[in-house]
Image (cartoon, grey):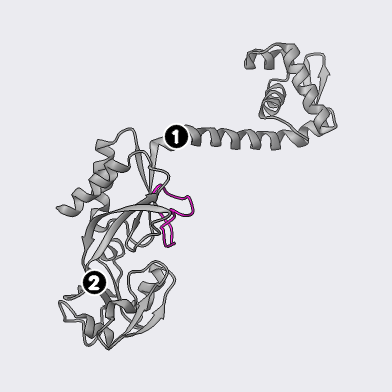
Amino acid sequence: MEWTLRELRVFVTAADTGSFTDAAAQLHVSQAAVSRTIAGLEKIVGDRLLRRVPRGCELTAAGQQILPLARRVLAEAESFTEFLHSRHGVLRLGYAWAAVGRHTARLQRDWAQRQADIELELVRHNSPTAGLAEGLCDVAVIRRPTDEKRFASVIVGLERRLVAFASDDEQWSGRRQLSMAEIADRTVIIDPRIGTTSSELWEGSGHVPQFIVSTDVDTWLDAIAAGRGVGTTAEATAHHHPRHGVTYRPIKDGPRIAVRLAWWRDHRPRGLDELVDAVTRLYST
């Protein structure tokens, strides 16, 4: 059973106009072509869809059943066509926790002014590649090393590492900065899939904290606000996810976090060079 979009379009047009003649005029084909096309569709369906009447045509019972489904298929096909036409005009930038922190709004504003022919669309997806591997974005903001066989990447900036803790923490509420050793004395909440915190940060120190696993930034923040533990994160998180009850402070000896833009190695999306330049420029200011 093989039908075509053209057959559905001719059928819907004839049903809407109520006339093979008017459908032919609207579709810029001959009346004979409309008749043949509908006859072919009726043969595939196994039922008559339109019956001739003195002033044109009208739907049969089978035609009434099929018409809404045909409209839906044509609408989906039109959406697909629009996507194909517009996909090169949109650059989708994925991120998991935080985009580019305090630079995010400036990036979007500057891009809209300088790149009128390419729209920058931010996509949040909670995965190690921020939606890149899943095909949800064209370029991803990543703060961990990538699979170099699959993805190309470039470091566009460095961010300070912060510690996040409950604002009413009795020991730390008055502190302006903390150390990695002090954090090791606490329970640390981590997201091992996409976070930047692991036991490697304390490698060689002789003292590794206890860890609690979180699944995303919201549950991570909720657990910290509730006093279940503390967390370390890139400074972008503090700008992107301020939370009542959670305080962020710098870690004086915390290693900096590299911010990367990553893309599929076999596909260099349109606008990538401009995006790399724009983000690098923002981080350098």
In the rendered structure, which amino acid carries the disc numbered 2?
Answer: Leu
- N-terminal of the pair, mark 1 or mark 2, is 1
Image-quadrant location for residue 146: bottom left
Neighbours of disc 2 within 10 Å: few (<14), some (14-19), many (20+): many
Image-quadrant location for residue 116: top left
> Looking at the picture, how far across and down is residue 156, in whole percent?
24, 53
Report the front residue among 160 and 64: 160
260 is within the stretch colored magenta: no
> Looking at the picture, how far across and down is residue 279, in whole percent?
24, 49
Left or right: where 131 falls relative to 58: left
Q: What residue is disc 2 on?
A: 162
> Residue at image x 32%, y 56%?
99
Neighbours of disc 1 within 10 Å: few (<14), some (14-19), many (20+): few
Image-quadrant location for residue 117: top left
> Looking at the picture, how far across and down is residue 61, in whole percent?
82, 33
* Residue 260, label in figure: none
Q: Which residues are magenta?
A: 124-139
- Report how far apart the C-alphas of labels 1 and 2 lie in the structure: 40 Å
In the rendered structure, which amino acid carries the disc numbered 1?
Answer: Ser
Left or right: where 73 falls relative to 2: left
Q: Is residue 108 above or below residue 206?
A: above
The quadrant of the picture occupied by the N terminus is top right
Q: What residue is disc 1 on?
A: 86
> Residue at image x 35%, y 72%?
221
Q: State the count of labels.
A: 2
Give the prevailing secondary structure in the magenta stretch. Answer: loop
Q: Are marks 1 and 2 in contact (CB under 8 Å)?
A: no
> Residue at image x 29%, y 44%?
275
Left or right: where 235 falls relative to 53: left
